[in-house]
Amino acid sequence: MNPNPAPNPAIGHNIVPKMTARDVNVFYGQKQAIKNVSIDVSSEHVTAFIGPSGCGKSTFLRCLNRMNDTVDGARVEGRIELDSQDIYAPAMDVVQLRARVGMVFQKPNPFPKSIYENVAYGPRIHGLARAKADMDNIVESALRRAGLWDEVKDRLAESGTAMSGGQQQRLCIARAIAVDPEVILMDEPCSALDPIATARIEELIDELRGRYAIVIVTHNMQQAARVSQKTAFFHLGTLVEYDDTSAIFTNPKATRTKDYITGRYG
Amino acid sequence: MKLLIAFALVLALAGLAYLAGRARAVRMTLAAGGRIGAVHSRPAYHGAYVAVLALAPALILLAGWGLMGEGVIEGRVLATLDAASQPAPGPDRAALMNEVRGLVAGDLPQAFNPLAPVLAPRYAATRANLDLLAGALAVALLCLGGLWGYSRIRPDFRARNRVESQVRALLLLASVVAILTTFGIVLSLIFESIRFFRLVSPIEFLTGLAWSPQTALRADQVGSTGAFGAVPLFWGTIFIGAIIAMAVAIPLGLMSAIYLTQYAQPRLRRWLKPVLELLAGVPTVVYGFFAALTVAPVVRQIAVALGMSDASSDSALAAGLVMGVMIIPFVSSMADDALTAVPRAMRDGSLAMGATMSETVKKVMVPAALPGIIGGVLLAVSRAIGETMIVVMAAGLAANLTANPFSSVTTVTTQIVALLTGDQEFDSAKTLSAFALGLVLFGMTLVLNIYALAVVKRYREAYE
């Protein structure tokens, strides 16, 4: 019997996937970073990608909003769909795709602008607000949903780069949800933060669940266990196992997953 | 010539001192069993220490003699004359001594001053004696220093630390030379400017609107009253260097930097960027030809076509346009650095929001890089207003206070060139005004440079 059967990409019965990936291969020049990954992501769950460093989990995440397009020499094969539309099809406009699939990065990267302007950036370029009052509402509701409003409502004009790391990261989340995306990709959003700031972000992720399809890449297994309902384990560019988070952590099917979970390597 | 031989001899002896010191240290190391640590410093350091002790005093003596020896010899030679025939100090004395030296060297067949043939043999003898004395003293100092250093070689002598601090002193000296030179330049400008400001009031110089530096040689001469209002020159400098040239260089430089950093394929960037920077290597006099022979006639034709029938062939526009092209590489390479220094995360953050590349550049990259870009522009302005050749060749000499780019204007640097070329008397306000102009120009570029460097530094800190 094959020791590592291809995992079932599906997420379960009666759930319509938000994004589906089938047989995705990614190359950086000659090097293959992702091999035949197929996976479904839904709005009902927070999906965690775990795996050792260099396993391709971030690379795969960046395929989901075509951020790999900005990397020289990167090539993506296979089919990735958002609401059954092929996102790599010529008809798909990458600008609109990224407005629908937002992203939060590993290191907080607020723009060197005021807090208000950071959140207003997306709505402004997409023309979501007609009047100043509309924009004020969008900014306030995005900051509220990101749990940042009470902390910053009196200093919206201050620079976004002057806040603490945790606040900066929540500002980046507010910035991402200000354009009301359908999917939010988070690439190790807490790796640069202290435990208290991390706990705030994790609470926030839990509050945002259901409203957005959230995919979070993390190298912290406890974090994956805390915030996600589905977990995908990547190793050496392949998707080894994809299942309910509880199943992955209590009863992994593949030996590699088990070894990683129990800390034998990683 | 003799001094040169003395230098060579001293250097050769110092080389011997090095070899001797090293050889002794080697013997000592072997005697100590050759273990690491038995002798504090390696033989080469002992050798270098001995050589420095030998060389430094001898070199200082020879350099001092080279600088001051002439004065000593002159004093001794003149002292042989009786009091009645002593030349007056100042020009008379200098002229006499020049003739004496000419006779000694054989450059001068005959002297005007009857004293010169008398003094010439005395001068030659004194010089020969004193040169020999200085050389002998130098060699003696060298031997003494070398022997003292040689005697200090011991296993526990920290020769390495000594040599290292001597090298540090040498490095400090090297960096101080450039700074001292700058101070010297400023001082010489200030002294000559003070002489000028005794003749012309600084207020007239800095606020006067008429520039006509020709002063009358005779009282009845017409039209050469001399006016030293430098405002038209400063205006011309700013008009060409800071307005017209920047109107060319800022958009072109900034746009090429944006293209090269954000859009160009790496392969294209690899050869386009060096080619652009080649522009900075073109000698400015070549730009001057280009401005005077190619651009200026075209500009004049345009002016004529626009209805200015008396358009000059020298124009602010021709000089400014070419100067703008010349400083494109300054602007683009600073803007390139500034844009490259903006973290990639910033760009990705904007692209991930669904911003287009153009929106990202306009709203995120350029604002974030703005301090660096401004710093580059200020450095370019400072370079442009100090630029000389292009404006000398293409901008003209008429000190017009005008905002018409087709008319001829003049700049500070052009006027300095015009004032100081050819034979000039150094006691007239006309000639001295060049130094006052130079001082003001130096002040302007200094302030611009300091400000630009401060701006650039602040933005470097922002991303660390």
Image (cartoon, rainbow, N blue to C red):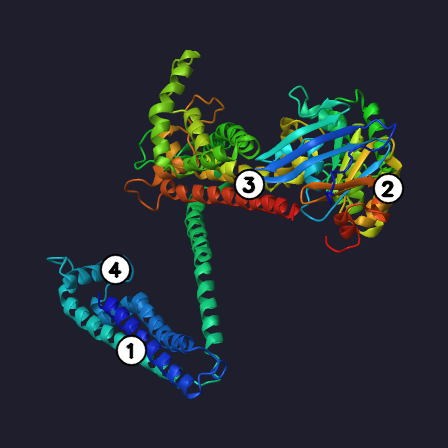
The residue depicted at 36 percent of the width and 75 percent of the height is: B51
Residue kind at label 1, given as amino acid type: Val
Q: Which residue does the numbered mark 4 point to in the structure image? A: B94
Q: Residues within 10 Å of mark 3 (few under 14, many from 20)?
A: some
Quadrant of residue B29 in the image? bottom left
Q: Which mark is residue B104?
A: none
Q: Are marks 2 and 4 on the same chain?
A: no
Distance CA(mark 2)–CA(mark 4) = 82 Å
Which type of secondary structure does the marked residue at label 2 adopt? helix
Residue B445 lies, with reference to residue A65, above or below; the image says below
Q: Going from the N terminus, do you reach mark 1 or mark 4 first?
A: 4
In-image side of B74 versus A255 (left or right): left
Q: Position of residue A70 (x, y in %)?
A: 62, 33
Q: Position of residue A71 (x, y in %)?
A: 61, 36
Alpha carbon distance from label 2 to label 3? 36 Å
| Label 1: how many Cα within 10 Å (few below 14, some 14–19, many 20+) | many
Same subunit: marks 4 and 3: yes
The residue lying toward the viewer, choosing from B23 and A226, is A226
Q: Which residue is mark 1?
A: B139
User: In front of the other: label 4 or label 3?
Assistant: 3
Which residue appears farthest toward the bottom when viewing the image? B31
Chain under numbered label 3: B
Q: Residue A151 got which mark?
A: 2
Q: x and y percent of residue B418 in the render?
A: 35, 36
